[in-house]
Amino acid sequence: MSGESTSTRGAATPARGADGAPRGGKRRLPSGPDSLLGILAKIILLGIVDAVAAYALFQLAVGEEWLVFAISLVVTVGINWIYLRKDGLPAKYLAPGVLFLLVFQVFVMFFSTYIAFTNYGDGHNSTKEDAISSIQLSALERVPDSPQYAATVVEDGDELLLLVTDPSGAVGLGGAEQPLEPVQSAQLDATGKAIGLDGYTTLQFGDILGRQGEVSSLVVPLTDNLDDGTLQTQDGSTAYVFKPRLTYDESADTFTHVGTGVVYSDSGEGTFRADDGSELGTGWKIHVGFENFAKAFGDDNLRGPLLQVVVWTFAFAFLSVITTFGLGLFLAIAFNRADLKGKRFYRILMILPYAFPAFLSGLVWSGLMNAEFGFINNAILGGANLPWLTDPILSKVSVLLVNLWLGYPYMFLVCTGALQSLPAEAEEAARMDGASAWMIFRAIKLPLLLVSLAPLLISSFAFNFNNFNVIYMLTGGGPRFSDTTFDIGHTDILITMVYKVAFGTGAGRDYGLASALAIIIFIVVGVISAISFRKTKALEEIN
């Protein structure tokens, strides 16, 4: 009996270590009660988070964005659960970082991938229903000899509406989102014109002048069908009937030009297209599969410039790393001499370019290199007229020189630190063996430096592969290629090219194509980085 009782107690009580914690099981971090200040800070911060989340959820519900609504709701509940429970200290520290990682990295990556498989861009940025409404509104023109409507502009909150009196004396009220509807209790002047309505603020003449743009762009549908016409006014006192020159047949899903009779039907590519190949300007967003990737390498208008840009991007990144590393290492070795006086002062001078913002330096250098008025041509070269920024070859040289000026201080700093960490015994032994300074550098210092600097050189290559600031601020990517309609130039690298495709004006904005190019850049940089890091493992054997 006594033995059974002892065995039972031993099984129920786990073995504990010297600190009293259970052995072989999960060990919880000690957690004490929060202070009053900590509890108040938690309540305030969670309250702010929940208030922002509630506002966002309300807006998402109004916009019927149910998928994003569900994700946002789950995240909000998860944050409250993490910070309101007593345990789970690691999760409380990791949650903000994980959340920002999901929002700013994972979401952006997935959204860019999604856009790359669509035709999203100028004229294709919404749904088909929105495109139909846009076409109807953009095709409006004034009906010849249309009746005049006496108009009064009224305001309801921030919304402008037209209070109109038709030639028969009937009064109606309508706005951009509200078709014209008859009203009975309007205030009339001596001529029978409606000049006010209870619950609405009438705009005076000065108010109309101040908001002329809003007033002239106000379109009031006569009925729910835009083909029945709309009312528009330019002076805020007289409105006329406008009708679209293109009428939409919902059953046939076609637009017909009233004057010419040309029929535009759904092309299946996010546009309305006629039999002669002409298209209406406004389309809608659709999925296009790998069309954007195929366009990058198959479109004659883009393939040639893209290949030149790819070659120059690799050359720019490689030469930038080589030149900045070479100059930075040379200066680091020079200033590392023990007998050099004033090293601190020289080092401060060396890192000054590092303190300048890159985009500002690009603008300054673009002025210095101006062919007609720049300091370099007029002061240094005695009035020469070298086209530093407009010649295809010289512009590339200019970009490399400016990037060298900006980049060598960083390499100088890292090389200085790496040199000072090298063992002095190795160099001393080599000198006693009769090795020259060049042999010591080539056979001892450089291999040892590359062990620690190789990852930095790889990251520098990746940085220069996407070095947007220098290119865009110095040359703007120019001089421009003459064999393409895209705004692409001889000094453009892939990232500036993507920016111009996405936001430029050469051939319209094409976010789908820009996203496809961005994915290609991501793959190229990722592959090069992976291969390079694998190769650098060989250097570790030196140690």
Image (tube, rainbow, N blue to C red):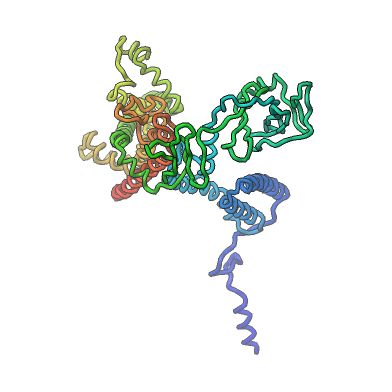
Percent position of residue 152, x then y: 70, 26
Q: Quadrant of residue 180?
A: top right
In terms of depth relative to the viewer, which is nearer, 412 or 342? 412
In terms of depth relative to the viewer, which is nearer, 31 or 467? 467
Percent position of residue 538, x then y: 28, 49
Q: Quadrant of residue 206?
A: top right
In terms of depth relative to the viewer, which is nearer, 188 or 67? 188
The single residue placed furthest to the left in the displayed view is 434
* Residue 413 makes an appearance in the image: no
Q: Residue at x 73, y 31 (%)?
A: 171
Height in image: 523 above or below 33?
Answer: above
Quadrant (top left, top right, bottom left, bottom right) of the N terminus: bottom right
Percent position of residue 22, x then y: 58, 69
The single residue placed furthest to the top in the displayed view is 383
Percent position of residue 84, x then y: 67, 55
Height in image: 65 above or below 415?
Answer: below
Q: Residue at x 77, y 30 (%)?
A: 186
